[in-house]
C-alpha cells in the first residue's frame, strides 16, 4: 500500500483549491438512473469512491464517459446515461466496499419498480443501519424484504410508488437522499418531515429540479415531492467540499499558517467557521473563497457534533488533531457515531494527551508533537493524522492511505503547493 510521509514544522501559506464535494458527488451520481437522457456532472472530484460508484452504475446499465479534463487538472466532467437499465441488482462485491452504494436503492425503485441491493459497507466508525431508508420507502408504498444480506424493494405491481408521508424519528442524511430519489417519479405526493438539511441535500434537490422534479421546502426540514411522469437530462456542477475546506483550515491553524480556501462557501460551513474563530483563527470571506489565518497556538474549544446546521461529525477528528497543540483543554462530544474516536490511539503515538470516556474526549494541548509511524482507520481519522503530522517534529509516516484517497483529491499536491514537506511513497 502507498504511504504518505510528512516532515513537519512548515507553516502553510497560499491558496488551496477546494474540490467538488465527495458527499454530494456520491448522491448526484445515482440520479443518472432516474432518466434515459444524459446527466453531465461538472467539478466531479477524482476520488476512489467516485470511481467505485461509476463502476456500480456501469453494472446497472449506465454508460459513463469522462470528458474535457487533463490528468493534471483537479476535478472532472462526467456524463452518465442510462438508456435502459440492464440490471436492478447492486451486488455484494461492489456495495461492501462503499456505504454510499445504498443510494441506488431509491432511484432503481423509482425507475424500474424494483431494486435488490446488498447491505452496505464503508468506514468502520460505528453502527449505521439503513432501517430509516427502508421505513421511508415503505411509507411511500414500497414492499421491503430482507434476505441473505440483500434488501429487495418493490413497488405495487412493479409500477410506480403511490406516495405517502414519513417523519424521521432522527435526522438521517442518507435516508433523506434515498427517499428523495425514490419519490420524484411517484404517482402522488411524497412528504418527508424532520428531513436532513445538509448543503449536500440541497445540492441533490437542486440537481433533481434541474432534471424536471418538483420539490418544495428545499433547505428546510419538510420536503414535499410531487411525483412527475419522467425526468430529463441536465448539466449540473457539484458543490465545493465543505469538509475538505474545513480540513485544510485546521491544517492552517495547527501550523500557524495563512491560507485561502478557493471555492469554499462560508454559508455552507458556518458551524466549522464559528469553531475556528473560537480557536482564535482569523476567518474572513474573500472574493474567491475563505481566508483562514492563525497567529499563535489554538485556544481551547468545546464542540459537540450534531446534524446540520450543527457541527459536523465529519469535522470532529480534524479539530481534535488541531487542538492537540492548543493552549488548554478542549472538550469534544460525539453524538452521531459511537465509534468515531479510533484516531485517538494513533494520535497518542505522536505525543498527544487525549482522554476518552464514552462519547466524550478531553484534549489537553501539549508543547510539541513527535513524528511517528501511524495507521489510518477511516477517512476523517486519516486526515487528522495528516494535520498532526504537518505540525510534528521529525517525520510522520501515514499508512493505509487508501482511506484518504476515498475523500481527498490529490491531497499531497495541494499541501505541497502551500509549503508542506509531504510526499506519497508508492508501494510499487
Image: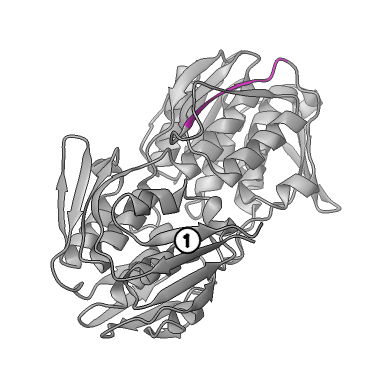
Q: Could you say which is closer to the camera, residue 239 or residue 146?
A: 239
Nearer the observer, 53 or 225 = 53
Tell me the magenta residue range: 76-83
Quadrant in the picture for residue 205: top left
Above or below 153: residue 406: below
Residue drawn where x is 65% and y is 50% of the image: 98
> Is residue 335 magenta-colored?
no
Q: Residue at x 34, y 70 (%)?
A: 8
Q: Nearer the viewer, residue 156 or 409?
A: 409
The image quadrant that residue 206 belongs to is top left
Image quarter of residue 275: bottom left
Residue 79 is one of the magenta-drawn residues: yes
Say whether residue 339 is left or right of residue 85.
left
Count of marks, rendered view: 1
Q: Name the spot of residue 343 as percent of width and height, x first.
A: 49, 73
Q: Residue 217 vs residue 228: left or right? A: left
Quarter occupied by the N terminus: bottom right
Any part of residue 2 in sight? yes
Say which residue appears at 35% left-offset and 82% top-offset.
362
Q: Is the image coloured rainbow, by chain, by secondary structure, or in one colour?
A: one colour
Residue position for label 1: 380
Q: Position of residue 103 (x, y in %)?
A: 62, 40
* Placement of 84 over or under 352, stated as above or below: above
Main SS, magenta residues: strand
Quarter holding the C terminus?
A: bottom right
Residue 214 appears in the rendering: no
Query: Is the residue marked by circle 1 packed among few (<14), some (14-19), or many (20+) residues within 10 Å?
Result: many
Residue 166 x %, y %: 55, 41
- What secondary structure is found at the residue carrying circle 1? helix
From this viewpoint, which residue is outermost toward the right?
A: 148
Q: Position of residue 158 (x, y in %)?
A: 79, 25
Q: Where 231 sits versus 323, above or below?
A: above
Amino acid at each position: 500500500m502507498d504511504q504518505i510521509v510528512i516532515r513537519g514544522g512548515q507553516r502553510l501559506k497560499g491558496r488551496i483549491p477546494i474540490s467538488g464535494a465527495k458527499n454530494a458527488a456520491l448522491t448526484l451520481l445515482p440520479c443518472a438512473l432516474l432518466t434515459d437522457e444524459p446527466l453531465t456532472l461538472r467539478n466531479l472530484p477524482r476520488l476512489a469512491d467516485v470511481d467505485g460508484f461509476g463502476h456500480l452504475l456501469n453494472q446497472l446499465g449506465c454508460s459513463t464517459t469522462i470528458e474535457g479534463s487533463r490528468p493534471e487538472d483537479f476535478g472532472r466532467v462526467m456524463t452518465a446515461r442510462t438508456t435502459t437499465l440492464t440490471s436492478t441488482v447492486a451486488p455484494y462485491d461492489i456495495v461492501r466496499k462503499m456505504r454510499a452504494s445504498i443510494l441506488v436503492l431509491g432511484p432503481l425503485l423509482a425507475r424500474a419498480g424494483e431494486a435488490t441491493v446488498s447491505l452496505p459497507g464503508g468506514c468502520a466508525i460505528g453502527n449505521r443501519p439503513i432501517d430509516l431508508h427502508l421505513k421511508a420507502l415503505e411509507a411511500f408504498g414500497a414492499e421491503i424484504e430482507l434476505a441473505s444480506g440483500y434488501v429487495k424493494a418493490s413497488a405495487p405491481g412493479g409500477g410506480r410508488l403511490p406516495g405517502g408521508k414519513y417523519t424521521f424519528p432522527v435526522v438521517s442524511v442518507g435516508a433523506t437522499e434515498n427517499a428523495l430519489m425514490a419519490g420524484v417519479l411517484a404517482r402522488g405526493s411524497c412528504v418527508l418531515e424532520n428531513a436532513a438539511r445538509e448543503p449536500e441535500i440541497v445540492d441533490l434537490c437542486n440537481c433533481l429540479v434541474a432534471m424536471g422534479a418538483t420539490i418544495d421546502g428545499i433547505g428546510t426540514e419538510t420536503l414535499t415531492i410531487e411525483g412527475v411522469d419522467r425526468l430529463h437530462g441536465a448539466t449540473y456542477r457539484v458543490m465545493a467540499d465543505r469538509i475538505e475546506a474545513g480540513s485544510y483550515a485546521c491544517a492552517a491553524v495547527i501550523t500557524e499558517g495563512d491560507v485561502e480556501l478557493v471555492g469554499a462557501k462560508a454559508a455552507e460551513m458556518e458551524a466549522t467557521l464559528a469553531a475556528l474563530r473560537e480557536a482564535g483563527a482569523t476567518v474572513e470571506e474573500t472574493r474567491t473563497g475563505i481566508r483562514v489565518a492563525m497567529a499563535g497556538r489554538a485556544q481551547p474549544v468545546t464542540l459537540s457534533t450534531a446534524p446540520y446546521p450543527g457541527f459536523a461529525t465529519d469535522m470532529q477528528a480534524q479539530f481534535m488533531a488541531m487542538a492537540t497543540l492548543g493552549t488548554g483543554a478542549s472538550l469534544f462530544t460525539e453524538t452521531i457515531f459511537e465509534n468515531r474516536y479510533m484516531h485517538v490511539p494513533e494520535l497518542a503515538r505522536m505525543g498527544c494527551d487525549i482522554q476518552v470516556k464514552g462519547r466524550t474526549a478531553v484534549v489537553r494541548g501539549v508543547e510539541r508533537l513527535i513524528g511517528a509511524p501511524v495507521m489510518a482507520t477511516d477517512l476523517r481519522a486519516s486526515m487528522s493524522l495528516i494535520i498532526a503530522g504537518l505540525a510534528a517534529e521529525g517525520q510522520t509516516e501515514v499508512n493505509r492511505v487508501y482511506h484518504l484517497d476515498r475523500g481527498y483529491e490529490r491531497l499531497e499536491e495541494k499541501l505541497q503547493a502551500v509549503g508542506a514537506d509531504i510526499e506519497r511513497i508508492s508501494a510499487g
